[in-house]
Amino acid sequence: MKRDSRLSGLLHVLLHMAGREEPVTSETLARIMQTNPVVIRRIMAGLRERGHVRSGKGHGGGWVLACDLADITLRDVHEALGEPQLLAIGHRTEAPSCLVEQAVNAALADSFREAEAMLLARLGTITLAMLHADFSTRLALRARPEGSCP
């Protein structure tokens, strides 16, 4: 089963945007993500609708963050993507006639709901500012000479 990497990809794009003062074109973001500019515009649309980013057309246009990184959570980004399925595992058959499979599905459904609720709650506590701070720390550590302590 192919994994849905849009959340990871969009977070990557947003952090690249955070380090820039000028608008970033869909073409530039597409090169960063090794995808098509149309894909970038499609995934950015949900963030624009929620007021997290703005876009401008024409010369000097592109995408810019419309709010502070501390105001955008990973859950916000997940929701902007249309709330794709979080778990890649599921039922063998959605509406089985077998009573055994019905019992299995019922047990799994409860577990899946609980796991998704916990994951969504956690995503709601992590902001883009936190990711940017982590990136900045990693960048600073990489810039230190080998053998030096943090």
Image (cartoon, rainbow, N blue to C red):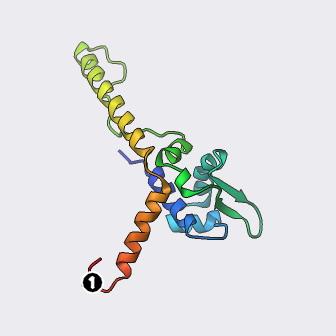
User: Quick check: can you spot residue 34?
Assistant: no
- Placement of 22 over or under 90, stated as above or below: below
Quarter of the figure that contains the N terminus: top left
Give the x, y percent position of residue 77: 52, 48
Q: Nearer the viewer, residue 102 or 48?
A: 48
**Image point 32% across, 37% down: which residue?**
89
**Image point 62% across, 55% down: which residue?**
67
**Image point 60% across, 68% down: which residue?**
28
How would you rate the neighbour count of disc 1 (Cα within 10 Å): few for under 14, some for 14-19, many for 20 or more? few
Q: Nearer the viewer, residue 45 or 97?
A: 45
**Image point 43% across, 46% down: which residue?**
125
Count of numbered badges drawn on the protein: 1
Q: Which residue is mark 1?
A: 148
Give the x, y percent position of residue 2: 38, 47
Give the x, y percent position of residue 16: 53, 66
Say what amino acid the circle numbered 1 marks.
Ser
